[in-house]
Amino acid sequence: MVAACAIVLYLVWRVREVIRLVAISLFVALALMPVVDAIDSRMRAPRALIILIVYLVLIVSVAVIGYVVVPSLVKEVQQISHDAPRYAADLRHNGTFRHYDDRYHISAKLVDDARRLPQLLGHLVGPLKDVTVQAASFIGQLTTVLAISFLLILHGREYVNLGLTVSGPRSRRYRQLIVDVNRAVAEYVLGNIVISVLATVATWIVLSILGVPYALSLGFLVGFFDLIPLVGATLGAIFVAVATVPVGFPTATIVWVAFIIVWQRFEDYVVQPLVYGKTLKVNPIVTIVAVLAGASLLGILGALLAIPTAAAIQIVLRDWWSHREQAAVAAGS
């Protein structure tokens, strides 16, 4: 038994990349299946065509967001670098800041760093040759994930029914368990998208009122970062805070920081409970540990997968514990 377990673990380790791609594909399929089902119930079209249309919409959306956001960020960096001396002079009007600036030369360091921003941005383009070398591998993995997800969405129920035929009298229980896990993953993904859209709209409105350039692009940026659990919203807020500096420092920056603090509290205590409901009631400690573990394994993608994975494990453990208690009560009676 020890030798057999060692061989199995060795084989699993050797095919870990395949297992990772299959797990990602399963997550994508569970997330998109409700969307495809909703469209399929309203359209008289082949299910395969509907899946391809959903894929196309997602790819075009990502491309459009990238096309809108990246140029505006480059222009913001150039503007901040150009106006850095003026911002430093404005800061020195404050007596407290001027006292520490004379001692530690803060403004000089800030101006020097700001002037180097375009140069640093140019250096980031240098490693593109390394990225292009890895592009073929990434495209291959992406194609694999999309192909497996396509088959799971198209024939997933057939695969599930085939697997349940060997479970005997427990098939009904396992079927309900699969339905619960599917619902949890789908509600998390759709809920996360809804919350990110709300964050995008709210950011766009506030930045438009403040007169910040490229308000819509920055709204998309905040919405994208808001998809990342725990730290995403804070990262997006930092980028936008930098973009408010050329508009009216420090008033616009202070207004933005105050807004994002209030918005995050509103999102945590009002929006998320309404969107997620009771399906994703995961213990906060489990959430933090799951996000950290997922991020260490798969980076940003792992952080995105962490919470629905933890919710799925919680559903499975809850089902196992309830049936264990029922078995114990039946044995005692």
Image: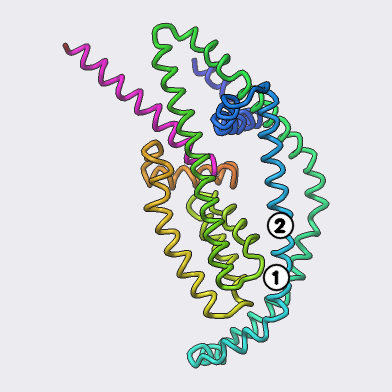
* Residue sticking out furthest to the left: 333
Name the mark nearer the viewer: 2 or 1.
2
Give the x, y percent position of residue 65.
68, 52
- Tell me if 245 is positioned left or right of 256 in this view: right
Q: Secondary structure at mark 1?
A: helix
Residue 39 falls within the magenta-colored stretch: no
Q: Secondary structure at mark 2?
A: helix
Residue 311 falls within the magenta-colored stretch: yes
**Of 263 and 318, the residue lying toward us:** 263
- Determine the residue positioned at 67% across, 23% down: 45
Residue receiving disc 2: 68
Checking the image for residue 31, the label placed there is none
Check disc 1: other Cα within 10 Å, few if <14, some if 14-19, many if 20+. some
- Determine the residue positioned at 43% across, 54% down: 267
Q: Does 1 sit above or below residue 70? A: above
Q: Which residues are magenta?
A: 303-332
- Asked where in the image residue 24 lies, by quadrant, the reply is top right
Q: Does 67 sit above or below residue 251? A: above
Check disc 2: other Cα within 10 Å, few if <14, some if 14-19, many if 20+. some
Residue receiving disc 1: 77
Number of marks in picture: 2
Q: Amino acid at mark 2?
A: Val
Q: Is residue 280 visible?
A: yes
Q: Amino acid at mark 1?
A: Val
Give the x, y percent position of residue 1.
49, 15
- Determine the residue positioned at 68% across, 39% down: 57
Quadrant for the C terminus, please: top left
- Tell me if 315 is positioned left or right of 129 in this view: left
- Determine the residue positioned at 31% across, 25% down: 321
Magenta: main secondary structure equals helix
